[in-house]
Structures are given as structure tokens and as C-alpha cells.
Amino acid sequence: MSDQAPLPFATATIARLYMAQGKLTQAEALYQQLLRDSPDDPRLTAGLAEVQRRLHSGGAPVSADQVALAAAGDRLTCTWNITEEALGRARALSPDPARLVLRLMVFPLGPEQKPADTALEALQGSLELDPPPGTALIAAAVGLLGEERFHSIAHCTFSPGS
């Protein structure tokens, strides 16, 4: 595609479609074209980086971002695996400095109940947690917590009675 004229309707959506179809060379050329017009767009930069990473790794996508909760006796084990690419996408959406956290919410919610945030030092790991009593459902999310917003990267739900 780099030898061809620029596409008249070049968009990041088309570049993502090329990538999803495995047309990595076309996706790379399209991201480069888009970045010439918008060199400071972090989403385009992240898209190009992902395409180039896939080109150099034989086209394999990064392993999926995930969070999981499981019962371990009378405790819960939370495991997570977040990719650098997902962290980069979340940072591009967060206008203020943000830190990586595990956020837990329990349901049913009480009137004074707030999310419990635990700072994370690594993109993958596990924690043992005490399950809150009287909980029907627990939601866990790993994401970036800024001053005003939480940007979820991956999440899951768990029912302690299951």
C-alpha cells in the first residue's frame, strides 16, 4: 500500500480492520498515513506500535488481558495479566497521572459502600483477598485510577455461592 496513493477515506477503524484481518502491511501503511496528518494522536501511535509488534512477532496478537477471581478455601484469589499495549491505550485515555489498581466492588451495594482500590506494582500477578460477608456478586477490574476517573482495562465478576 505504501507504493499506492493515499486512501481518500483513511480512518483508524479501517486500519484496525486491516489488523483484525491479518493484513498487517496495509494496516501499518494506513497508520503511517494517518499519523502524517495527526502526529500527536496517542491512539494512532499505539495502533502503529501494535501492528509493528505483530509484524516482528509473526502476526501473533498479544495474549488477552484478563482478571479472574476464584475461591480458595475461605479466601478469594485474584489473578491478572495486563499487556503493555492495553496499558498504553488506557494511558492515552487518561488525561491526568494515573496508577495501576485492582478495583473491587461488591453487590448488593450498601449506602456507604465504595470501591476498594489496591495499588498494583506489576502487570501480572495474584493476590489473596478476604471475601466480604453477605456478598452476592463481586466485580474485579484492573485499570488506571486518576484523580477523576477509573479506566478499566480488564474485568470479571464472581459469585461466591457458585
Image (cartoon, grey):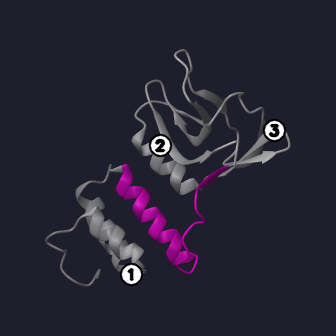
Mark 3 or mark 2, which is nearer the start of the sequence?
3
Height in image: 63 above or below 73? Answer: below
Q: Amino acid at mark 2?
A: Arg
Q: Amino acid at mark 3?
A: Arg
Quote the CA–CA distance across marks 2 and 3. Answer: 32 Å
Q: Residues within 10 Å of mark 3 (few under 14, many from 20)?
A: some
Q: State the extent of the magenta-drawn residues as a range.
A: 42-68
Q: Provide the residue designation for mark 3.
A: 75
Q: Provide the residue designation for mark 2.
A: 91
Height in image: 103 above or below 47? Answer: above
Q: Residues within 10 Å of mark 2 (few under 14, many from 20)?
A: many
Q: Secondary structure at mark 2?
A: helix
Q: Position of residue 16 (x, y in %)?
A: 35, 68
Apparent side of residue 125 relative to residue 87 in the rendered image (left or right): right
Q: Position of residue 19 (x, y in %)?
A: 40, 73
Q: Provide the residue designation for mark 1.
A: 23
Image quadrant in which you'd find residue 28: bottom left
Mark 2 or mark 1, which is nearer the start of the sequence?
1
Q: Amino acid at mark 1?
A: Lys
Quote the CA–CA distance across marks 3 and 1. Answer: 46 Å
Q: Measuring 70% from the left and 42% from the top, which residue is drawn there?
A: 160
